[in-house]
Image: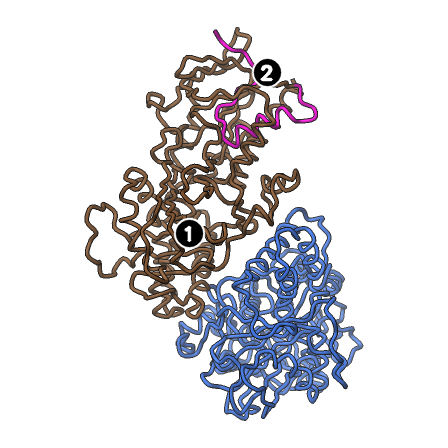
Chain colours: A brown, B blue
């Protein structure tokens, strides 16, 4: 039996929930709770927001997915949460943007980045990249690694030996933004423009999900993995039919597809892929080939006490230089420490006196550790020893994320490899351009972090994209 | 008797000299040395480049005017000087861009800007300003002071008490870029985008002037203040006639006017104004009313020994907060210390072990001290006491610039007050837009720091504008 509804939303992450929320709470909405159905493939809602309160042995809460309000000056989720009283910046937030401390294998103690003006050179490299690619649209894309080498060659006479040794390695902090390696990162799109500071969400991002879910009275069906979308049906009382692996069939006039880009990009015959009938238009299909998916992961270690500089917000342990002498390999590890940088969030500045470190990792390290979580300490220990101010302790607890192993996530969020072009996919999926995406007249919309330019890859981007889909549906309906 | 020539250039600053240099050294130039005459009102060439080697009691060289290569990634003067071997970055330059130390009257010792994340908030304010004015072209301009207050009100909940007290005061460092006060600075144009780092020119900028002058065999007539420009004459063998106070008359086909904006803006009957016959077109006249002229000045103190932190590149002593309790006034001073911030360049990091401080000042302080140089130590001492690590010494030598008192300079360089619009003047004077400036068909060009967008106010901007004028003349001639 086909369950009939007006709007079907695939995915109960922040974009899908916000779409439903906006549809139901808009002052002029014609929709009631039964007009909207949300399908969620997993046994939980939230998508790549996942706040954990069980795994800690120190009674701490961790966001295993999104954790910061980025672009704090313009972040709609932050601003609306402040407004409705659900988030108190002073109590629930922490701007952990103190200048971070840098460490390298060959240097004892903290690197004197200030004295050596290393960050001024890193800024200079970023400006060089901007100027290089702004020169013309024809400038070919190269990797972050390559464009940094170009800077180092061209401006060798501007640099001290220390700057030459360390600054290129420092630019690899971008790996911990994108979740991919500097050899993969598109140089053209490497440099970000932030709309304000990064506010760590101490409260846990689940509050946003819970708040939205609380205000949505529609059905949210979990464990409903969509397998087939039959679209633009004629002669039925509904326009699209959505069929799930468990056999549920939903007929709906409007469809909002918020599955991750990683799912959208799967072939229809893949176990977790979606069959479209008729198939997805080739413009969407092609655009999906010009963008990749990153693998930002997290490793959390809890300790009996703090053995690192307690008041620093963060630490970056640099990867070795390409030409640096290799130390003896650590047995049993396919990826050796110091081949990729790590970014360490000092949880002790987020939750006072918490003896906990949250370490960000990138592909391929994330994939490797998420597949082999028991190797995590062996991999991390030599790098963490660099930040120790007293003897390093073994952890009393280790938490490793599983985004790459989760078949419904398959990684973290969209990421641009060399030669990729984000605008294509966004043009196709945003629904803001005539004759793009599903074509004009279609009542299928897309939402999610991969469908929007402002806040791409972020919670607020996803949230805004859900709102955009809802607004479009309301407008379309009112015009019919 | 009218001296006839092909090109007359008014002003022997860097833009005028580069114009002549380009005209004479272009591979396809039809001009010989006698085809170009340069008129200079002062008894020296260089304009607002002035390298002094006589005033120091420590045998030091000081640039009283321009001192840095700004935008080091794209600076044409720097790059061409490296290429021709006249400037060796490692030997002759110094990137004095170590994070500066901040001091305030009410705080003992250096402010812990890092620990309080003050610079992150200052960056946030800059981003806020950018977002605020980018919202639409209709957003009304307000002063830097006002837009900072708007940020402080709107984002109060983002800020700690220390940040609220100090960060707005820190943004006043921009006064030492523009040479005007935060109440005057146009908020809309306050935030700068730099094309790279700032390289201090240890060699002294005179080398650029001398290099250009050496390669120009044309007459450079000093002490020739232009009083009258009779333009677009018919029936004579020359198109324009330039008459000076001393009675010299030059007839020329092409005219390049590089006098400072401050001179261009004077009424014709002013002692130092220029009469145009026919008058300057009203579009130029009007554009000159929508831009101001700053007064960046320098005070240099030499001491018997270093009594401040020797290895810091620079110090900013903040002005008091508007509502801070006032200390007893210092007698005999019309402007009290701590009402305006000062930026102190530690000359000891530029010339090792030099016991010398170079202090930048803004209007109205510059005007006041340049008029009353004997008051300088009385004014500066209370602020300099803040940076003392041992007892402060009295100077053994004081040098104060005289840009505001020099009738041929009248200040430093163009500056944008609230409501100003730089594009108007640049559109009128750049010669790059049809039917603007002197109109199409005119053979009068303008050059100087005030006539160009990239590098506005800088040596390389002036240099490029001179080159632009020369290129245009060569092209125009070849097309006739």
Question: Of helix, strand and loop, which one carries label 1?
Answer: loop
Asked whether residue A167 appears in the rendered view, the answer is: yes
A272 falls in the magenta region: no
User: Which chain letter goes with mark 2?
Assistant: A
Residue at the spot 71% in from the left edge and 73% down from the top edge = B339
Marks 1 and 2: CB-CB under 8 Å? no
Q: Tell me the residue at 67%/61% (across/down).
A: B422
SS assignment at label 2: helix
* Side of A461 relative to A159 (left or right): right
Q: Quadrant of the N terminus of chain B?
A: bottom right
Q: Is residue A283 above or below residue A312?
A: above
> A390 or B410, which is in the foreground?
A390
Which numbered disc, 1 or 2, marks the residue that appears first in the sequence?
A: 2
B314 left or right of A291 in image: right
Residue range corresponding to the magenta coloring: A1-30
Give residue A253's quadrant in the image.
Answer: top right
Q: Residues within 10 Å of mark 1 (few under 14, many from 20)?
A: many
Residue lying at 42% horizontally and 78% vertically, measured from the top left = B86
Query: Residue A442 appears at what percent x and percent y?
Result: 54, 20
Please provide percent x and percent y for residue B235: 70, 71
Residue A140: in sight, yes or no?
no
Is residue A11 inside the magenta stretch? yes
Q: Compared to A263, does B4 lie above or below?
A: below
Residue B363: give x, y in percent of width and height.
70, 74
Q: Nearer the viewer, residue B218 or B358?
A: B358
* Above/below status of B355 relative to B201: below
Q: How many marks?
A: 2
| Residue denoted by label 2 | A34
Instruction: Please give the chain letter of the residue carrying mark 1.
Output: A
Q: Could you tell me residue B461's position as x and y percent?
A: 56, 67
Of discs 1 and 2, which sits in the foreground? 1
What residue sits right under mark 1 in the picture?
A: A355
């Amino acid at each position: 039996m086909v369950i009939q509804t007006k709007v079907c939303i695939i995915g109960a992450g922040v974009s899908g929930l916000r779409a439903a929320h906006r549809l139901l709470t808009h002052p002029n909405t014609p929709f009631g709770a039964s007009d909207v159905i949300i399908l969620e493939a997993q046994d939980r809602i939230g998508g790549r927001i996942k706040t954990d309160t069980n795994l800690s042995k120190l009674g701490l809460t961790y966001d295993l997915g999104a954790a910061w309000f980025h672009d704090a000056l313009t972040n709609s989720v932050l601003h609306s949460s402040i407004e409705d009283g659900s988030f108190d910046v002073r109590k629930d937030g922490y701007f952990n943007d103190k200048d971070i401390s840098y460490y390298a294998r060959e240097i004892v103690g903290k690197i004197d980045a200030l004295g050596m003006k290393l960050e001024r050179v890193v800024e200079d490299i970023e400006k060089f990249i901007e100027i290089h690619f702004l020169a013309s649209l024809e400038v070919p894309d190269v990797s972050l690694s390559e464009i940094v080498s170009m800077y180092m060659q061209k401006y060798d006479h501007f640099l001290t030996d220390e700057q030459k040794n360390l600054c290129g390695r420092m630019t690899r902090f971008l790996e911990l933004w994108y979740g991919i390696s500097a050899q993969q990162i598109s140089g053209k799109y490497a440099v970000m423009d932030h709309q304000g500071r990064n506010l760590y969400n101490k409260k846990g991002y689940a509050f946003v999900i819970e708040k939205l879910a609380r205000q949505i009275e529609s059905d949210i069906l979990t464990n409903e993995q969509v397998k087939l979308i039959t679209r633009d049906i004629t002669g039925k009382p509904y326009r699209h039919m959505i069929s799930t692996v468990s056999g549920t069939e939903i007929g709906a006039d409007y469809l909002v597809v918020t599955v991750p880009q990683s799912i959208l990009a799967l072939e229809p015959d893949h176990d977790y892929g979606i069959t479209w009938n008729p198939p997805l238009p080739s413009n969407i299909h092609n655009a999906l080939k010009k963008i990749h998916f990153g693998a930002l992961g997290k490793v959390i270690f809890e300790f009996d006490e703090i053995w690192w500089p307690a008041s620093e917000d963060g630490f970056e342990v640099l990867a070795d230089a390409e030409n640096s002498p290799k130390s003896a390999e650590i047995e049993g590890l396919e990826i050796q420490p110091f081949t990729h940088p790590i970014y360490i969030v000092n949880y002790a500045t987020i939750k006072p006196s918490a003896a906990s470190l949250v370490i960000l990792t990138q592909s391929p390290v994330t994939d490797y550790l998420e597949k082999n979580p028991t190797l995590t300490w062996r991999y991390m220990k030599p790098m963490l020893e660099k930040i120790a101010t007293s003897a390093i302790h073994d952890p009393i607890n280790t938490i490793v994320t599983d985004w790459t192993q989760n078949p419904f996530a398959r990684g973290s969020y969209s990421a641009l490899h060399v030669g990729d072009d984000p605008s294509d996919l966004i043009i196709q999926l945003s629904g803001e351009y005539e004759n793009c995406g599903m074509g004009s007249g279609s009542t299928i919309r897309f939402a999610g972090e991969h469908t929007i330019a402002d806040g791409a890859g972020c919670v607020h981007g996803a949230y805004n994209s859900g709102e955009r889909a809802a607004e479009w549906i309301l407008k379309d309906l009112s015009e019919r």
